[in-house]
Image (spheres, grey):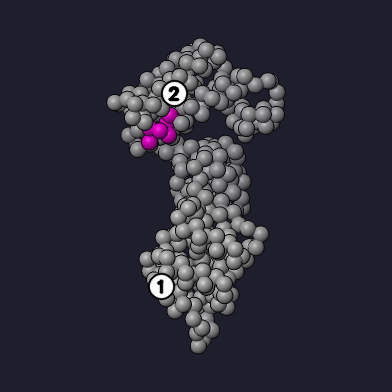
Amino acid sequence: MARKNASDDPLAPVTLAVGQEDLLLDRAVREVVAAAKAADADTDVRDLSSDQLQPGTLAELTSPSLFAERKVVVVRNAQDLSADTVKDVKAYLGAPAEEITLVLLHAGGAKGKGLLDAARKAGAREVACPKMTKPADRLAFVRAEFRTAGRSATPEACQTLVDAIGSDLRELASAVSQLAADVEGTIDEEVVGRYYTGRAEASSFTVADRAVEGRVADALEALRWSLSTGVAPVLITSALAQGVRAIGKLSAARGGRPADLARELGMPPWKIDRVRQQARGWTPDGVAVALRAVAEADAGVKGAGEDPEYALEKAVVTIARAARSRGRA
């Protein structure tokens, strides 16, 4: 989700969208353009890349018009602007033109930091568009998308959708939109599975779930399907690590209600119930063996071994066998 500062007027003279999440950057632009067109249907929109904004171009675009038309000037990859153009932009920030909204899209970081600092110092409206690298961030994004659509979705449904789709925010947003349009009532895990069965089977988390449940054949089948559909091996080792660690954390935790354990372990309550079922039959020694297997696989897929697929298969089998007392091997 794009986070905005307190001064949240899309028609502010300058909007600064900072981050590397393309979907959120595009939404920040669309929000400004929509507000401008709502104020004036004839708003002129100029969407420029950094190399298109040459020295003097901004002055031309923001010069007074005979018709006093509203205008939105979008500058993408502002961190890549030339030094001379940056001088033009900084000068403009000190005296922005009326009826013109300047939107600067900046990746953040050290490159072009002088322009970033100048825009902030000038009081630009800022929209944070960070890259969502953590599963928890993507889960929060999906929940927010359902809320924005005015729809109710269970926690399990949101998690299943993230597991099935992966890290692409555009695809996640599209999936939420499709479910919201097609499904009546509360959207649950079964509905998501019905729509995205093929994607869910290819999920790295499906591999992990089957492995920690001791289901060797199912885990290997899911692993091979995942690899054949292009799932990165490093994502699979990450999912395996999360699955085994969750079991270790829950096994070591004091008993209690899911809500209490959720606060203690940093997991949503519904996941506590799932991990509890998966953890039955696991021993501390089994968790230790499984964690070593994950570490070896992680090294294997990152270059320490010759065959990443073999490293993953070995880890999956070891983890599943560590749970064999469940009687599911």
Establish if 115 lies above or below 259.
below
Q: Is residue 191 left or right of residue 84?
A: right
Q: Position of residue 92 (x, y in %)?
A: 52, 73
Residue that badge 1 annotates = 55
Q: Position of residue 197 (x, y in %)?
A: 44, 37
Front residue of 255/302: it is 302
Amino acid carrying mark 2 in the image: Val
Q: Is residue 311 left or right of residue 183?
A: left
Tell which residue pokes out farthest to the left in this image. Answer: 306
Q: Secondary structure at mark 2?
A: helix
Q: Residue at x 57, y 58 (%)?
A: 127
The magenta stretch spans which residues?
Answer: 232-237
Residue that badge 2 annotates = 294
Q: Residue at x 44, y 23 (%)?
A: 294
Q: Are marks 1 and 2 in contact (CB under 8 Å)?
A: no
Amino acid carrying mark 1 in the image: Pro
Establish if 207 lies above or below 47.
above
Q: Position of residue 277 (x, y in %)?
A: 57, 22
Mark 1, other Cα within 10 Å: few <14 / some 14–19 / many ≥20: some
Tell which residue pokes out farthest to the bottom in this image. Answer: 66
Q: Is residue 300 left or right of residue 22?
A: left
Establish if 114 lies above or below 227.
below
Label 1 vs 2, first from the N-terminus = 1
Residue 303: image quadrant is top left
Front residue of 169/94: it is 94
Q: Residue at x 46, y 31 (%)?
A: 238
The reply to whether residue 37 is visible in this rendering is no
Q: Magenta stretch: residue 24 in it?
A: no
